[in-house]
């Protein structure tokens, strides 16, 4: 409970699970860097699913999160009801001024709980959406219907990119005036030299290396990635494909290990993704759907050009022809782009240098923190909690 002299805005942040991925990186960045003199934060999350890596354990042990049983990814009515009940109780105890939810299930339960607990302001971030390629048409219609209802109970809807927001508005989810584009913010550790990175990963010094970093799920199309690998290997058999990640579709890659032999290296989750990128000539993304892919942002921060499918907000990350090459969801075109970059060291270097400048300028953690603080301050002023946007003065108790 805040003391009477504590004038900070209380923010309750809710995410379904802190598995390794873009949402968890953004949430941990905000938890670390939001101004503690102006904001008091609490983070609530569910359990990481079996086969997923825990971002908190791997990369953010300093970030404290309250674990809510039943808040994880899987939909189970009794567990969901238990999680909802716990969230309502926590809101009544903490009395947040703002509830900010991330990811679909947390957005549903968290926003419902906020209505029941009469929280004054509700914000939800769409790190992507589930409108295309994830579920059957019937299930997608149900999801859209639920999101339409939830949007009515939400003050501000944030999207990681213009394309994601446009898709949601086109589906009738919320009003245009509710939306704000909030690009992600991330950072990577200091990368080792290419020589040292390859030594750490057990890779030969002179082999071309194509990397993939991220969750291995059906929507990420590991089968298409393998199709690209086969085409590239037919032209350049010395190429290595390094996969840093894990997930429910990992069996697709494991089944191809024998066929591709030593050309396919499965290194699992690593907290030092900068090492994987530093060892790479090109990073590859073959997905059918994306929000704003942080893996491509992080690769660019290390100076690695990307080859990726033109889906979601990928084109808002990769400048086609300047920081990488974009393609249709077609293995042949992706493979041609990979081979073009592998064959042209000068082009790789130019694109890598452009990527470093772009990614650090547009997608750094300081920019995300500043934009988020500005949004919260705007909400605080609108509710009369702050008169001065630059200082935490006089927020009323949450009603």
Image (cartoon, rainbow, N blue to C red):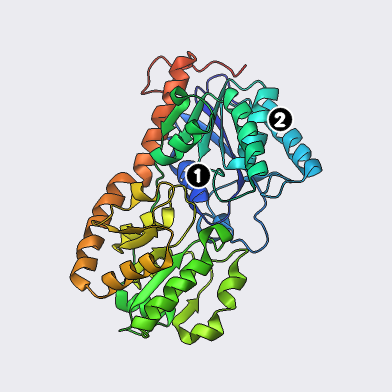
Q: Classify mark 1: residues with Cα within 10 Å, few (<14), some (14-19) or many (20+).
A: many
Circle 2 or circle 1, nearest the eye = 1
Let me know if residue 243 appears in the view.
no
> What kind of element bears circle 1?
loop
Q: Which residue, given by chain and number where applicable, does mark 2 sit on? A: 88
> Percent x, y for residue 94?
64, 29
The reply to whether the C-beta atoms of the residues labelled 2 and 1 are less than 8 Å apart is: no
Q: Secondary structure at mark 2?
A: helix
- The location of residue 323, given as percent across then percent down, is 27, 57
CA distance for labels 2 and 1: 26 Å
**Residue 203 placed where, x, y %?**
40, 82
| Residue identified by numbered label 1 | 128
Residue found 58% across the figure and 77% down from its top? 254
- What residue is shown at x 55% (from left), y 85% (from top)? 258
Q: Residue at the location (60% across, 66% down)?
A: 249
105 over 246 or under it: above or below: above
Is 332 positioned to the left or the right of 12 in the image? Answer: left
Residue 325 sits above or below residue 223 on the image? above
Which badge, 2 or 1, comes first in the chain's sequence?
2
Relative image position of residue 295 (x, y in whole percent): 42, 58
Residue 396 located left or right of residue 112: left
Q: Nearer the viewer, residue 70 or 257?
A: 257
Task: Please give the name of the residue rendered at 55% of the width and 73% of the height, measured from the top-left corner.
Answer: 253
Q: Quadrant of the C terminus?
A: top right
- State whether residue 250 appears in this view: yes
Query: Is the residue 94 above or below the residue 218 in the image?
Result: above
State whether residue 331 is above or below residue 164. below
């Amino acid at each position: 409970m805040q003391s009477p002299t504590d004038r900070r805005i209380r923010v309750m942040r809710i995410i379904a699970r802190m598995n390794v991925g873009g949402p968890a990186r953004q949430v941990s960045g905000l938890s670390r860097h939001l101004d503690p003199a102006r904001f008091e934060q609490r983070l609530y999350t569910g359990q990481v699913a079996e086969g997923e890596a825990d971002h908190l354990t791997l990369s953010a042990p300093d970030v404290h999160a309250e674990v809510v049983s039943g808040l994880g990814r899987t939909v189970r009515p009794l567990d969901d009801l238990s999680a909802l009940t716990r969230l309502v109780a926590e809101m009544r105890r903490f009395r947040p001024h703002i509830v900010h939810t991330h990811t679909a299930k947390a957005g549903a339960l968290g926003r419902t709980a906020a209505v029941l607990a009469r929280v004054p302001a509700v914000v939800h971030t769409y790190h992507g959406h589930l409108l295309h390629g994830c579920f059957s048409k019937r299930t997608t219609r149900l999801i859209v219907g639920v999101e339409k209802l939830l949007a009515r109970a939400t003050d501000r809807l944030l999207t990681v990119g213009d394309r994601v927001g446009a898709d949601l508005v086109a589906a009738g989810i919320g009003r245009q005036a509710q939306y704000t584009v909030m690009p992600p913010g991330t950072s990577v550790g200091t990368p080792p030299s290419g020589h040292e990175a390859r030594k750490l990963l057990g890779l030969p010094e002179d082999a071309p290396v194509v990397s993939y970093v991220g969750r291995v799920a059906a929507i990420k199309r590991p089968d298409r990635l393998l199709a690209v690998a086969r085409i590239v290997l037919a032209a350049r058999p010395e190429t290595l494909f390094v996969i840093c990640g894990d997930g429910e579709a990992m069996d697709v890659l494991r089944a191809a290990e024998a066929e591709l032999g030593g050309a396919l290296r499965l290194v699992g989750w690593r907290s030092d993704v900068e090492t994987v990128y530093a060892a790479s000539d090109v990073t590859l993304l073959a997905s059918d759907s994306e929000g704003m892919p942080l893996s491509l942002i992080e690769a660019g921060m290390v100076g690695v050009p990307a080859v990726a499918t033109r889906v979601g907000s990928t084109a808002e990350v990769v400048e086609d022809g300047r920081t990488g090459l974009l393609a249709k969801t077609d293995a042949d075109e992706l493979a041609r782009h990979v081979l073009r970059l592998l064959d042209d060291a000068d082009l790789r270097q130019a694109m890598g240098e452009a990527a470093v400048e772009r990614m650090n300028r547009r997608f750094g953690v300081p920019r995300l923190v500043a934009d988020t603080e500005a949004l919260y301050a705007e909400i605080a002023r609108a509710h009369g909690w702050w008169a001065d946007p630059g200082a935490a003065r006089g927020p009323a108790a949450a009603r």
